[in-house]
Image (spheres, helix red, strand yellow):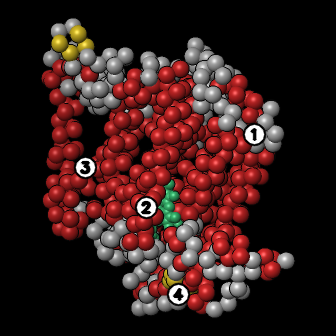
Amino acid sequence: MLEKFKQTQFYRAIFRTGGAPIATHKQRILVTLNNVFLHLHPVRIPKHAVKIKYTWCMGGLSFFVFLVLTVTGILLMFYYRPTIEYAYGDVIDMKEQVPLGLMREIHRWNAHLMVITVWLHMFRVFMTGSYKPPREFNWMVGVVLLILTMLLSFTGYLLPWDQLAIWAITVGSNMAGATPMVGAAGPGSSLLAIGDVNFVHSASDARFVMLGGRFVGEGALLRFYVLHCIALPFVIMIFMIVHFWRIRKDGGISGPT
Amino acid sequence: MENFKEIINFIAAPQIMFTALLAVFFFIFPPTDWLYSINRKLGLHKLWTKGGGIFLLVVTLGFFIFGLTDENFRLIVTKADNVPIVGLLFLVIFLLWLCLFQAENNDKRIAEGKGPMEAEDAKEKVLVWPDLVYIELIALVIVSALTLIWAISLPAPLEGPANPTVSPNPSKAPWYFLGLQEMLVYFDPWIAGVLFPTVIIIGFMAIPFIDNNPKGSGYYTFKERKMAISIFLFLWLLLWLFLIMTGTFLRGPNWNFFGPFEYWDIHKVEVLTNINLSELVYMIWQNKALPDNIFIREMYGFAALGIYFGLLPLILAKTVFRKVYDSLGPFRYSVFIVLLLLAVSLPIKMFLRWGFNIKYIVAIPEFFLNI
Ligand code: HEM
């Protein structure tokens, strides 16, 4: 059946390598070259680089988990409205009303998992000394990816709009209020004043910008929603593209020379 | 049994646990040749053999299984959002072992003039399709299956609807930020929440430019990069993961410390008699009132900071870090040493607190500037 299907014009239109059994060296190379996704990889790589004990697969898994998060996140967006009125109820409905209401679980646990895999990926890259020339820049791109991953996780934490969410974000955002000069409770902010008029106060400081309000409320929910669903995924994708591109350009996975 | 739990509760306190870990740390991960030879003499490198791995597994797993028989331990470890951190703990221990197991192996091979194992493997080339694509596929299937099981068996937490007037006690940030929240015990928010994160980001980006040792790129080794690995593990294991674990598992109501087998009693009081350096110098040692002028009042603190960030780098460059200074040059060395001193200021502040109840070195509440 399958073999027959592989001979159809339809199959061969999709897979450029065609349906013939892939047996020769040349055909195997063509599989990679002819496929836009596999083309991310080189055709031939040194054996140590495919060993799990070398890379632990952590970078690849970070990317895969990110894809799972994108898909489940889009599904969650179908049901979720980012307002104080609806958010909490919508989150409950995701479990109660939606068939196979598992999406929220998959999304949340994969989000935790992504923070973990990215940390461990960084740990591996350090331990193999893979940040050394010529890979310095890709390490820096990696650090940006790490921050973006944690920001994605942090902004998502608020969306269920339960006690856990708003108080965790309150703890986190209070720190922004302590930023030197631009936070109302930060050192030096009282210096930015003319006479009795303070420029930096709780309705104009860094925390206010982050939350869109003096406390974690409607404004913060909308801001975090937009950041979480649009802005940060967009930015992290761009950095990932650069990251993958540079892996190839820097000579593939690091190895002893 | 109860006695054993009491003992664990006692030694889990950060004062004791952190001090103990710090005391053994540089023998287990020796940064210098001298410590390295002691590490060998004590046989600590045997941790990174197969036997050592089994030992680590038995001890951690054993402790964990024993812990699960205790109600308080179970309560905190199986809290849905804490489960990933338990997983992280086991993964980190296993992967640390895996790195150093390969590193020891390679170091031995290099000493015999054979080159690292990776070089041996790299002689052979494999095709991405099918060799790598299949490994990737299997990894994806395994991870998908695991997360699916995880999702089915552990419901995502959802507490009562948000209520800005009732704050839970303790209020915790998400677990990956608990290292920073734990630092709040020792530093003001502008340091723990703003300065340190900034410094961590800059510091990490600076790593490739500070570590100019050309060796050890693309294979596991310890011996060729002792200093770099030791410092990195110090930051990542002791100053980051340890604080996260403490913040998650051992901090209860009012951010009080609770041992792993201790009940989270809201009414537990800890006597706080913290004082500032200026108060210690003027009021306790000299028995005087605090001077009115802020600069005179805080001059000892400023002097301490000046010595720490100004003089100490020079002394270190002439002594312990002589070789580092020679190879990095003045600019890179300055960046390196300031980053390192900032990191080390955390344990210093911890010990000042535990040993002398010092709250601030420099305290200028008039401008929210407390260090
Ligand atoms: C969203 C996060 C990230 C993704 C999806 C990602 C993905 C990847 C992938 C797929 C690889 C190929 C090798 C491997 O799987 O280990 C890789 C390599 C690399 N990554 Fe990342 N990464 C991420 C974050 C980071 C971070 C946080 C760092 C470091 C701070 C980093 C630094 C590097 C470097 C230097 C390499 C080259 C390693 C080598 O040649 O051996 N990446 N990354």
Q: Would residue A244 be seen by someone viewing this image from the given angle?
A: yes
Q: Is mark 2 within 8 Å of ligand 1?
A: yes
Residue A243: mark in rendering: 2
Q: Residue at x 64, y 52 (%)?
A: A68
Q: Is residue B4 left or right of residue B252?
A: right
Q: x and y percent of residue B37 in the render?
A: 40, 74
- Which residue was labeled with disc 3? B338
Secondary structure found at label 4? strand
Nearer mark to the viewer, of 3 and 1: 1
Report how far apart the C-alphas of labels 3 and 2 lie in the structure.
29 Å
Residue B250 higher or lower than B88, as above or below: above
Nearer mark to the viewer, of 3 and 2: 2
- For disc 1, the neighbor class at 10 Å (few under 14, some 14 to 19, many from 20) is some
Q: Chain of mark 2?
A: A
Secondary structure found at label 1? loop
Instruction: Check disc 4 and give the amino acid type.
Output: Lys
Q: Residue at x 70, y 40 (%)?
A: A104
Residue B334 higher or lower than A104, as above or below: below
Q: Chain of mark 1?
A: B
Q: Is residue B112 left or right of residue B47?
A: left
Q: Chain of mark 4?
A: B
